[in-house]
Image: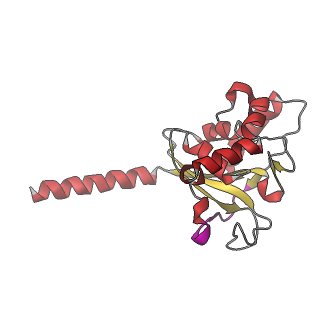
Amino acid sequence: MKSTLALTIFAASLLSYASNATADKAILAGGCFWCMESDFEKLDGVTDVVSGFTGGNIKDPTYNGNHRGHYEAVEITYDPSKVSYSELLEHYWVNIDPFDASGQFCDKGSSYLSAIFVANDAERQIAQQSKSKVEKQFPNNKVVTPILNASIFYPIKGDESYHQDYYKNNPLRYNAYRWNCGRDKRLAEIWGDKATH
């Protein structure tokens, strides 16, 4: 009995390790990280979405302190056997305004700009193909979302941890913010029924 139990526990730990070993990560910026968390956690194959900052030079940026030069972004953990990097990007585009050079929706400023952060040449190629599709779809608009090299991702932590899963923990405030910001209205204007909200 003990050996069967030990074997079962060992097998379960191997399966857990194997599932973690196949997980991959992507870093995307699309304005408010509360909204990006909400939009990506709905996607099948995504196992975790963490809010934070990336792209700048300041170490350990904070929301209420200094995050100059950083983008509000999310780190998405996903299972590539269920959702590909290309499919993540398809979902990304229909959840941002790729034409806004001053921020996203009601949030303006450099930390709210959209960007795709690529970790390697393969991701860069997929991201460029994905961006080219959007450019062809909107030939009269300039797609301003850049493709940038990935840098250190700093999760929101400590006293500011309330930003993680904000949409789950504060649904009334989150939904009021999202509606007042006009995010879903603008997404529908750009993407029509492809918008995923």
Residue at image location 62% in from the left, 41% down from the top: 88
One can see residue 36 in this view: no
Give 130 or 76, whichever is nearer the viewer: 76
Residue situated furthest right in the rendering: 140
Give 45 or 163, whichever is nearer the viewer: 163
> For the C terminus, which image quadrant?
top right
- Residue 113: percent from the left, percent from the top? 79, 52
- Residue 73: percent from the left, percent from the top? 68, 55
One can see residue 146 in this view: yes
Q: Is residue 37 left or right of residue 141?
A: left
Magenta stretch holds residue 155: yes
Magenta stretch holds residue 107: no
> For the N terminus, which image quadrant?
bottom left
Residue at image location 79% in from the left, 30% down from the top: 189
Q: How is the image coloured?
A: secondary structure
Residue situated furthest left in the rendering: 1
Establish if 173 lies above or below 196.
Answer: below
Q: Is residue 197 left or right of residue 140?
A: left
Establish if 1 lies above or below 136.
Answer: below
Give 61 or 88, whichever is nearer the viewer: 61
Give 119 or 39, whichever is nearer the viewer: 39
Stretch of the chain drawn in magenta: 149-160
Query: How many numbered discs?
Result: 0
Establish if 140 lies above or below 183.
Answer: above
Residue situated furthest top in the rendering: 193
